[in-house]
Image (cartoon, rainbow, N blue to C red):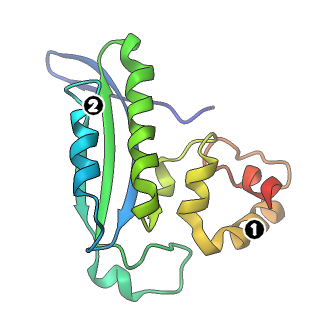
Amino acid sequence: CEQPDGTVHRGFIPKRSFFVRALFFEKTADMCKDVVEGIRSAPSPHCYFHFQHMGGAVSKRIDSLFTARQAEWSLVISAAWSEEKSAAACRSWVMQVVQKLLPKALGSYATDLGPEDELLAGHSFGHNTSQLVQLKKKWDPENMFKHGFPLAALSREG
């Protein structure tokens, strides 16, 4: 099954679907102008950015495959819509903002990725991509678990 879009139900608010991607940034990342331009171009009043503070103890651990240990911020780029006719524009907006900010980012949040996110997967896993691809080949040679991170596609590229 594909990674589903999210839905939110709260009281009398109509059903809303959402689409998100997140990027990691250093404390000194110059992204303010891009963030302001991004929110101004949002196709729905329900699109937003969520800044999550990172840093601290996570930056001290080096024995894992998470590559953005020096990140100070996670920027979650979120689009939400209540009418299906808005879905394509909202998804496109998220990916346009991601493309604009990606050169300034340390990486992307792997958990949000779907099978089509090959570019972001490379940014999520960074220098650890080849190690993860080898583990994928060993433990999932038939690509049974193909609906999340697109590691099999990355192995075809390299």
**Residue that carries the numbered disc 2 in the rendered image:** 42
Above or below: residue 91 compared with residue 150: above
Q: Is residue 71 visible?
A: yes
Give the image quarter of residue 77: top left
At horizontal 59% and vertical 45% (from top left) the residue drawn is 117
Q: In what quadrant of the picture does the N terminus appear?
A: top right
The percent position of residue 71, horizontal first and vertical second, equals 35, 73
The residue lying toward the viewer, choosing from 95 and 82, is: 95
In the image, taking residue 38 as reference, residue 135 lies left or right, namely right
Q: State the CA–CA distance, disc 2 to disc 1.
A: 39 Å
Q: Give the tally of numbered discs.
A: 2
**Which residue does the image show at 43% across and 39% down from the upper left?**
96
Q: Position of residue 41 (x, y in %)?
A: 27, 32
Mark 2 or mark 1: whose residue is earlier in sequence: 2
Q: Position of residue 157 (x, y in %)?
A: 79, 55
Q: Residues within 10 Å of mark 1 (few under 14, many from 20)?
A: few
Residue drawn at (32%, 73%) of the image:
26
Find residue 72 and name its label.
Answer: none
Amino acid tagged 1: Leu
Q: Nearer the viewer, residue 126 or 97?
A: 97
Q: Quadrant of residue 12?
A: top left
The amino acid on which the numbered mark 2 sits, given as a three-letter code, is: Ala
Residue topped by disc 1: 135
